[in-house]
Image (cartoon, rainbow, N blue to C red):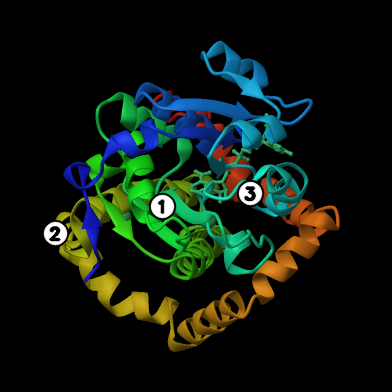
Amino acid sequence: MAELFYDADADLSIIQGRKVAVIGYGSQGHAHALSLRDSGVDVRVGLHEGSKSKAKAEEQGLRVVTPSEAAAEADVIMILVPDPIQAKVYEETIAPNLKAGDALFFGHGLNIRFGFIKPPADVDVAMVAPKGPGHLVRRQYEEGRGVPCIAAVEQDASGNAFALALSYAKGIGGTRAGVIKTTFTEETETDLFGEQAVLCGGASALVKAGFETLVEAGYQPEIAYFECLHELKLIVDLMYEGGLEKMRWSVSETAEWGDYVTGPRIITDQTKAEMKKVLGEIQDGTFAKNWMDEYHGGLKKYNEYKTQDAEHKLETTGKELRKLMSWVNDEEA
Ligand code: NDP
Ligand code: MG
Ligand code: MG
């Protein structure tokens, strides 16, 4: 059974007694820095020369210094720059400023799990990863709620690394919703698998294939868009609220029957065998290596895929239709 921790299990004064550096001010960085500050924590933000978000961080009342200065001043350093550049930022700005007893924090375990970052033995290495996008993490905190987090300790030099991680999670509202204990290995592998096989990769491929099937059969793209993409949110909302059971309670009996007999014809034993292969390539580091090569090789294939999908009829159709639905927010949260 998973170990869960709530507000009463976490001592906010631990993180309030430390100096925290949040490196990066993107989706996660801004949420962590602002909420920690509002929780009475001494925070500085570390941003590189030419950072696009520096002005915003300062406007929001935070002190911005360089990543090196932030790492030197602080004794808890949370790395929230994009995963593919973390190793470089760590080598150049954080490692030279790490002191025995410091804590190195992550929002995702990839660089530790696959050995791109190798911290010295005398620092704590821990993770606090909200299970939601950064803008929601901040909004929920401001509303007195929180996004559930997972927390892990890779290296417990101080003997108190987990209590420190829980305290940090409390500072961003995580313990209001619940914090689950995990490991860097479990978080990294399940996160990569989930986004590839189900949430992003699986879901986009399913939506595209369904849309194409209807359009190729001569149905109107607008109808196909509503059927295969738009309605998916309504179905997923029901799953989120009450699992498959609530979704099936809400849809018609006809839809429920179709779910039982057709679902397994779409996601077949072959699909599941491929999922196992995908998981294997995540576990043995093949995916991480290929992604780092792609990133540092200039993102050629990545940009090709991006352009291809932007020009897909599903996307061009959706763009037009959403203009007519003012309540569908097409902008970043
Ligand atoms: P973003 O891409 O949103 O933000 C990156 C930030 O890093 C930006 O502020 C950027 O600066 C800054 N940055 C870029 N280069 C440097 C540098 N050399 N030195 C200092 N800062 C730099 O990242 P995310 O918030 O999406 O991801 C951060 C971490 O959180 C990752 O480990 C990710 O896996 C994890 N995570 C992300 C989630 C999410 O909701 N996005 C969910 C859970 C975990 P600028 O733009 O100002 O130039
Ligand atoms: Mg992820
Ligand atoms: Mg229907």
Tell me if label 3 and label 2 are in contact, CB under 8 Å.
Answer: no
Q: Nearer the viewer, mark 3 or mark 2?
A: 2
Give the residue type that dot 3 points to. Answer: Lys
Q: Quadrant of ligand 1?
A: top right
From the Cβ of disc 1, is ligand 3 less than 8 Å away?
Answer: yes
Q: Earlier in the sequence, mark 3 or mark 2?
A: 2
Give how far across and how far down residue 22 sits, in percent: 55, 35
Q: Nearer the viewer, residue 20 or 222?
A: 20
Residue under label 2, please give it. 249
Quadrant of residue 69 within the rendered picture: top right
Q: Is residue 130 visible?
A: yes
CA gap, disc 2 and disc 1: 19 Å
Mark 3 element type: helix
Is residue 172 visible in the rendered image? The answer is no
Label 3 crowding class (10 Å Cα cut-off): few <14, some 14-19, many 20+?
Answer: some
Front position among marks 2 and 1 = 2
| Crowding at mark 1 (Cα within 10 Å: few <14, some 14-19, many 20+) | some
SS class, disc 2: helix
The Cα–Cα distance between marks 3 and 2, rounded to whole angstroms, is: 33 Å
Q: Dividing the image into 4 quarters, which one contains the N terminus?
A: bottom left
Most distant residue in the left direction = 249
Q: Which of the two discs, 1 and 3, labels the residue nearer the N terminus?
A: 1
- Which residue is at 63% across, 59% downward? 119
The correct choice, above or below, for 1 with respect to 308 in the image is below
* Residue in the foreground of this view, choosing between 284 and 163: 163
At x 68%, y 44%, the residue is 94
- The residue singled out by tag 1 in the image is 227
Give residue 37's position: percent from left, percent from top. 42, 24
Using the image, tell me which numbered label, if any, was put on residue 297: none
Label drawn at residue 313: 3
The secondary structure type at the circle numbered 1 is helix
